Image (spheres, rainbow, N blue to C red):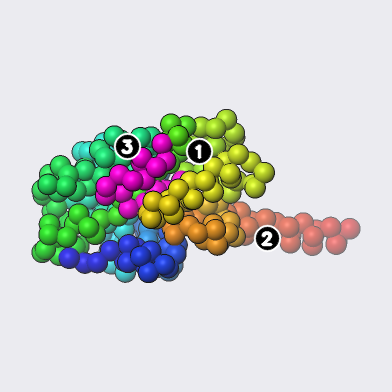
Amino acid sequence: MRKNKVKQMMAEGKPIVNGWLQIPSTVSAEVMAHQGWDSLTVDMQHGLVDYTNALPMLQTISSTDVTPLARVNWNEPGQIMKILDAGCYGIICPMVSNKEEAERFVQACMYPPRGYRSFGPVRGLIYGGADYADHANDEILKLAMIETKESLDKLDEIMSTDGVDGIYIGPADLSLAIGEKPGFDRPEDTKAYSEILRILEHAKKNNIFAGIHNGTPEYAQKMIDKGFNFVTIGADQRAMSAGAKAIVEKIKGSISKKESETY
């Protein structure tokens, strides 16, 4: 089976720079896949992507050496199994609040006897290889999202769940859970920032990977320096809107300056 480059890199102590796909387009997925990301996550929760979009996007990503991942919209076995069958090499599962939910998530990703994933990997065999079934339980990356109030009280029981490779922090939902305004790149004087570092500390204690969503490269680097293994920066639609806005503001500012010089 094709090795999971993300798991290999993190095991070697190398940080993963992950891109985020919210636009349901093979064209934008292809453009992103050629920009040097280590992995790309198809966002099926808050993006505009459903399964019929996700499948061709995974096919497009697979034309490069970028590792294809997906965030599902809920801890629902049917959706998890289906996107894995489509060739996804890792799942980010939202709103995992306790050990039972963590076990349910992990077992949906794993074939018996370690889980209850149904066999029928269709495209997984094409992308992963003929011996996919023999190694999928170990190669598929399983990241549980820590972002609810309950999860903050049950960090160790979630992180010690057999099969959980790591956790992933959604700062916006985490902030809401503790009574703060949602957003990325939480300032150091916020409770959310303190909780982020506490979650990281527990991940290290349980010897699992830690990931976090960031708004800027600078903050992502800060999180890597703190010890995070996996950092996401923005999303495809944010990159497009920020780039377009910068162009428009620059040219309009230049035009306004020239107009003022004529008076």
Whole-percent x, y for residue 47 in the image: 40, 43
What residue is shown at x 38% (from left), y 64% (from top)?
10
| Left or right of residue 134: residue 171 | right
State yes or no: residue 223 in magenta. Answer: no
The kind of residue on which mark 1 rests is Leu
Question: What residue is pinned by disc 2?
Answer: 251
Whole-percent x, y for residue 145 in the image: 40, 43
The picture quadrant where one finds residue 104 is top left
The kind of residue on which mark 2 rests is Ile
What residue is shown at x 55% (from left), y 62% (from top)?
225
Q: CA distance from mark 1 to mark 3?
A: 18 Å
Q: CA distance from mark 2 to mark 3?
A: 53 Å
Residue 222 seen in render? yes
Q: Is residue 100 above or below residue 19?
A: above
Residue 99, disc: 3
State yes or no: residue 166 in magenta. Answer: yes
Residue 146, disc: none
Q: Which residues are magenta?
A: 154-169
Whole-percent x, y for residue 53 in the image: 29, 48
Q: Is residue 53 above or below residue 78?
A: below
Q: Nearer the viewer, mark 2 or mark 3?
A: 3
Give SS at disc 2: helix
Question: What residue is pinned by disc 1?
Answer: 174
What residue is shown at x 51% (from left), y 32% (from top)?
177
